[in-house]
Amino acid sequence: MLRPRQKKECGPSVRAALGRTPGEGKPPHPPKLLKRKSGDQISWGNSGKDRLTLTQFRRLLDQISDGDQRLLMFVANKMALRKTKR
């Protein structure tokens, strides 16, 4: 990058090709940052196929007995703990 003094020493064709350098004039615009998703948007099962799966799972859980629900949660917990130990 040419300093202002060096730019003045260049010929007019080089100055025209260079145009404005980032250091001249107005400060650069800050970058546009992506908006973060809120907690409601991040959670699983809020939209699409995940939502349908979660709804169906909740409906099926409502139909089974309390003992079977406890057994299902016990097995799911064991599977999750086993997966994290690897």
Image (cartoon, grey):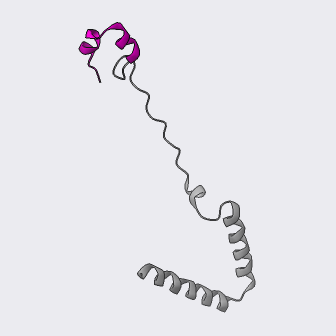
Q: Left or right: 20 with respect to 48?
A: left
Residue under the point 52% across and 48% down: 36
Q: Up-down: is 70 above or below 46?
A: below
**Residue placed at 59% from the left, 84% from the top?**
73
Residue at horizontal 53%, vertical 44%? Answer: 35
Where does residue 23 sit, x and y in percent of width and height? 33, 21
Tell me where residue 44 appears, x and y as whole percent. Answer: 60, 64
Residue range corresponding to the magenta coloring? 1-18
- Mark yes or no: residue 19 visible: no
Residue drawn at 57 percent across, 58 percent down: 42
**Position above or below: 37 against 3:** below
5 drawn magenta: yes
Among the 4 quarters of the image, the one containing residue 10: top left
Instruction: Return the x and y of residue 26 as percentages of the image width and height.
Output: 40, 19
Name the foreground residue: 52 vs 1. 1
- Image quarter of residue 64: bottom right
